Image (tube, rainbow, N blue to C red):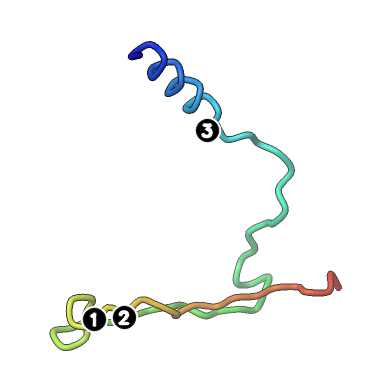
Amino acid sequence: MRRLALCATVLWLAGCGRQEGPRLFKQLTPGHTGITFANTITTDDTLNVQSSDFVYNGGGVALGDIHND
């Protein structure tokens, strides 16, 4: 039984390897995109993750091309 569990674990870990392939996206600099947003959250004694669970949720920028244009 232990050998079976060991073999299954080894096979599972071998299948978790990352395969390199063609990348779909490329990281661009703010100078190239014109986007200069920085999600800077200043915490203090009254605003922090212990007093509010949602301090870091929802702050960011999302971009997408829906119609491939």
In space, the residues marked 1 and 3 are separated at their CA atoms by: 38 Å
Residue annotated with mark 3 = 16
Three-letter code, disc 1 = Thr
Q: Nearer the viewer, residue 27 or 47?
A: 47
Q: Position of residue 11 (x, y in %)?
A: 50, 21
Q: Please give the name of the residue rendered at 35% of the width and 76% of the height, measured from the top-left corner.
A: 56
**In the image, residue 36 above or below residue 68:** below
Three-letter code, disc 2 = Val
Q: Secondary structure at mark 1?
A: loop
Q: Please give the name of the residue rendered at 46% of the width and 21% of the height, measured from the top-left corner.
A: 8
Q: Please give the name of the residue rendered at 23% of the width and 81% of the height, measured from the top-left corner.
A: 43
The disc, 2 or 1, on the residue closer to the chain's N-terminal end is: 1
Q: Please give the name of the residue rendered at 68% of the width and 70% of the height, measured from the top-left corner.
A: 32
Q: Residues within 10 Å of mark 3 (few under 14, many from 20)?
A: few
The disc, 3 or 2, on the residue closer to the chain's N-terminal end is: 3
Residue annotated with mark 2 = 55
Q: Secondary structure at mark 3?
A: loop
The disc, 1 or 3, on the residue closer to the chain's N-terminal end is: 3
